[in-house]
Amino acid sequence: MTEINHPQGDKATGADAQTRSGFVALIGAPNAGKSTLVNRLVGTKVSIVTHKVQTTRALVRGIVTEDQTQIVLVDTPGIFKPKRRLDRAMVTTAWGGARDADVLLILLDAQGGLNEQAATLLAGLENIRQPKVLILNKVDRVDPPKLLDLAQKANEKVKFDSTFMISALTGSGCGDLLKYLVGRMPYGPWYYPEDQISDMPMRQLAAEVTREKLYLRLHEELPYSSTVETEKWEERKDGSVRIEQVIYVERDSQKKIVLGAKGETIKAIGQAARKEISEILEQPVHLFLFVKVRDNWGNDPERYREMGLEFPNS
């Protein structure tokens, strides 16, 4: 089982007995809005968001410090029926994160209702003992009577401690959800410094930003098995940073798609990624992208370790 792995040693600042801290895991089907909600609650981007399913692969933690309470939000890969090794690793990671949290948020796409994906997700909660909260997302796109019916049916299948109707995209209802979570966190010192928003290294976050732009640009043309790695990171004397990243694909045909005619596609991806990475770092960025073919990387244990996933034996 993949665990959240609570940080050990000194729990940063705030050892006062009045402080609270805890872990909140978000689980749901692909594209239910987990990453969007994490970014909304944190107040900035810590998890990539695309329309492509299964974008989140490993556990991504966003840190919210509200008054005397610190909430570590764990964005998990979407729950879906796995077809291959990478799929199985992602689903195992998602359920592992759920079992190691103080509170569990179950996100349902209100537009999709209790479809097959939602039914599979709810059935999987049967043996999980953590407090469970139902989150109906994208409620701004559904009529109120349908929302009430969906909430009732979901609560009949699983005993939820509470139900919230939100729009992670617009922020509607998210303030009430955050207030609720603050009250549910156990007393204890904080795990991270007050100004930290994620435990993801900047090299990895920069790679994730580029992977997001890659997916947004190419949509269905590129399999989600492609990956991005930051290979060089140089802080320069003028205050800028020079970053070299490699986009790995599995076949030469995919490499041609990423490069595009006369390199136009990779140029556009690089410009979009550079702009966002620069905003996150708050310093000028010189980004250089390369595309390489790495055959059958989906069966390479080392790649799984780099992504924070356990390598399934079968």
Image (cartoon, rainbow, N blue to C red):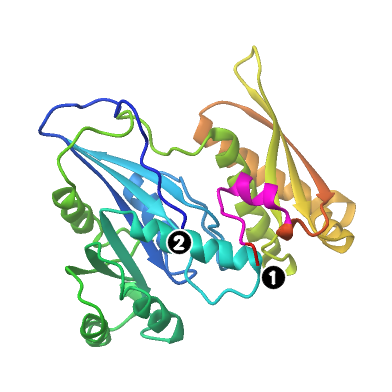
Per the image, label 2 sits on a secondary structure element best described as: helix
Which of the numbered marks, if any, corresponds to residue 94?
A: 2
The extreme top residue here reads: 237
Q: Position of residue 53 (x, y in %)?
A: 56, 68
Is 303 a magenta residue? yes
Mark on residue 228? none
| Towards the viewer: 156 or 169 | 156
- At 61% across and 47% down in the image, what residue appears? 305
- Name the kind of residue labelled 1 in the image: Glu
Task: Tell whether position 192 is magenta.
Answer: no
Determine whether label 1 and label 2 are within 8 Å by CB. no
Q: Quadrant of residue 250?
A: bottom right
- Looking at marks 1 and 2 on the same chain, the residue that comes earlier in the sequence is marked by 2
Disc number for residue 220: 1
Whether residue 77 is visible here, answered yes or no, is no
Where in the figure is residue 102, as x and y percent of width and height?
A: 25, 53
Q: Looking at the image, which residue is at 60% across and 67% down?
A: 87
Magenta-colored span: 300-312
Q: Which one is nearer the viewer's eye here, 87 or 112?
A: 87
Left or right: 222 in relation to 239: right
Q: Which amino acid is tagged 2?
A: Ala
Give the percent coordinates (x, y) of residue 56: 53, 58
Q: CA distance from mark 1 to mark 2?
A: 24 Å
* Disc 2 crowd, CA 10 A, few/some/many (<14, 14-19, 20+): many
